[in-house]
Image (cartoon, rainbow, N blue to C red):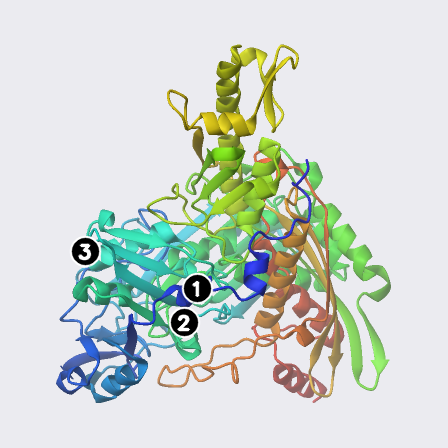
Amino acid sequence: MNYVNKGVRKKDAMALVTGKPVYTDDMAPANCLIVKLLRSPHAHAAIEEIDTEKAKKVPGIECVLTYKDVPRTRFTTAGQTFPEFSPYDRAILDNLLRCVGDPVTIVAGSDEKSVDRALSLIKVKYNVLEPVLDFRKAKDNSIIVHPEDDFKSLVDVGADSRRNLCASETFEFGNAEEELKKCSRIVEQTYHTKQNHQTAMETFRTYTYMDAYGRLNILSSTQVPFHIRRIMANALDIPKSMIRVIKPRIGGGFGSKQSSVSEMFPAVVTWLTGKPAKIVFSRKESLTNGSPRHESQIKIRLGADDDGYIKAIHMDTLWNAGAYGDHGPTTVGLAGHKAMTIYNKAAAYKFNYDVVYTNTMGGGAYRGYGATQGFFALESAINELAQELHMDPTELRMKNMLTQGQVGNVMPTYYNEMLRSCTLDQCLLRAKEMIGWDEKYPCRDLGNGKVRSVGVAVAMQGSGISNVDVGAVEMRLSDDGFYTLMVGATDMGTGCDTILSQIAADCLDTDMDNIAVHGVDTDLSPYDTGSYASSTTYITGMAVVKTCDTLRKKIVAEGARLLGCSPEEAEFDGKEVSCNEGLKKISLRDIANSSMVGVNSYLTATESNYSPTSPPPFMAGIVEIELDKQTGKVEIIDYAAAVDCGTPINPNLARIQTEGGIVQGIGMTLFEDIIYDKAGRMMNDSFMQYKIPSRIDAGTIRVEFESSYEPTGPFGAKSIGEIVINTPAPAIANAIYNATGLNFRELPITAEKIALALLEKQK
């Protein structure tokens, strides 16, 4: 292999670092309409009157749209394969407002100043209603978030809008209650995670225009172009054939752009006026009305014997969907099915959940997609079990977790899939060695009120959604013998265009520079479900392997025909086709050029790929912190990560993915906290108040790979994108316990919480 498993530079690296105009706002013309929204100041209110007459008279204003002016069809904004699991509970504009920031009117004008002036002149009379803000009180509350009659769910996920239920389900393997009764050791605790924002550098933004054929073109910063086409067709109540979606480069997504957040607003303006339009969310809008990680409350009952062998796990989960059910029914499932599976030796498992509507900002997809919340809870409970047993938490895990020796076993809590690759035990041993666990566990007193301690966690994720995700590519042999790779997968900064090119280059025995990659255009690209669920390398990568194999056969057949021999006699080395033991040869360049002339065949191939399995990547994370007992401040000294992602197609990009996920996990654990006031307004709506980690906060992060070989993946690869965020929260919480003797079961674990808890402990 010349390219696979090599640290190749990203194909778009120079364009990005030199500031080329490659993003959505760069491509919108200067004369397009500026679109902005008047948003609700109330968490729950009904619109009684809207006076827009003065606003419409402002010079430069093209339109002022209310719920009376736009289609009223219900849809979901979740970018998911049809039929979506998320309920159809949205409208472009509605007369019932369900959270602070819900859109009231859409204003479009020639310049920002006139639009701002028009927004200030709109008068709205609200009937302010009592909101339900505490998700613990939402189920069966007399306040109903979605009383509309046209609420619907295409898939039976247990939704019941009259009970404020977005989804509800129970899973059980074995008899958890009976097994727990037999256990001599039981940990029973409740863990609470808050909403967190993805905070991509590029905020939500979309540009729309009508083409010469009367079709709506949507150029947007999205992870899911094909899903956006369907969502917009539903929202506007028009055929999908009338919509084209184009994805430029994306300035980060992390799951936030797996939902349609901004597209509907300029789209409806362009559809109704025929004029190009764009919307660019401010940072405040992205924070107050984005699609953050769901808040969760997870009750754990963990049963084991005196030797530390886990016998039963019960996870009882409550999930805050917020005002809308976007990704609510699907994120919650990973909290149990991913977290429990890593301890595959137990006799019984139970996982039940309710996802409830409240009058807070609607949640959405965020890297880890529910597994992150689940692993914080279960891994923290595992660490608490180790405390009760007076056992090293790494030794407790080695007794119970999935290991290389269990390859071939069925995982009952993971949809009965078979484990085909795993080096988690090697990952944990490697991470221990990297951090110096045996020398540093549990803590060292440095004097002056400072303590250094270590903490541990392990995790797994998936590689795409089994039996659901589809990836397809087209590979064309162009004149002079270069290739064009048409992809439907979305590169959002992860480098998937580069990784797919690396796979293609080795499959075709060519140079990467000989492959041109074309980004996503729903009119031109083959179908792909999109970049989410850690699917691109595994799902779309195998589509590349299959497509290249098909194209190679076509090249051999065409070369053999031109040479006058049979395909069985011919060979292709990436540069030429030869037969008769090399006595006859024709170059790839000549084959390509001849394929465009006369009776010869133009050579192209396309294949799609799905997988009946979703092989889990694994990670062990061990952190060393320094904790100041006077102030409660936690400093990350060192984070050692050992990852099994199968074969790393590009180790440099895999390492960057890991480092980035760990930093986001550090932010979730120590800093990030969406805070609402009593009226449901987000109080920390800027980076001045919503703290995300800087490079200074991240400490030293070291990443190593303990590669397994996944037989169903391209060149043995699995995923990497999401597994990397799952270990920081429980590992840091464990290190804080080792430094203080206190377990913190709610995130974030701020310095104030630690300092106050230590003061309370001293009383």
Horizontal relation, residue 31 to residue 514: left or right = left
Point 51% across, 53% down: residue: 336
- Whole-Å distance between the Cαs marked 3 and 1? 34 Å
Is the residue marked by circle 1 packed among few (<14), some (14-19), or many (20+) residues within 10 Å? many
Of badges 2 and 3, nearer the viewer stands 3
The quadrant of the picture occupied by the C terminus is: bottom right
Q: Residue 503 at what x, y percent from top left?
A: 58, 39
Point 69% across, 45% down: residue: 6
Label 3 residue SS: loop
Is the residue marked by circle 2 packed among few (<14), some (14-19), or many (20+) residues within 10 Å? some
Residue kind at label 1, given as amino acid type: Leu
Point 70% across, 37% down: residue: 405
- Depth order, front residue of 210/700: 210
Decide which of tag 3 and tag 1 comes sooner along the chain. Answer: 3
Residue on which disc 3 sits: 237
Label 1 residue SS: strand
Is the residue marked by circle 3 packed among few (<14), some (14-19), or many (20+) residues within 10 Å? some
Horizontal relation, residue 737 to residue 418: left or right = right
Residue on which disc 2 sits: 136
Res. 318 mark: 1
**In which quarter of the view is residue 630 placed?**
bottom right
CB-based contact (under 8 Å), mark 1 and mark 2:
yes
- The answer to whether residue 122 of the structure is visible from this angle is yes
Of badges 3 and 1, nearer the viewer stands 3
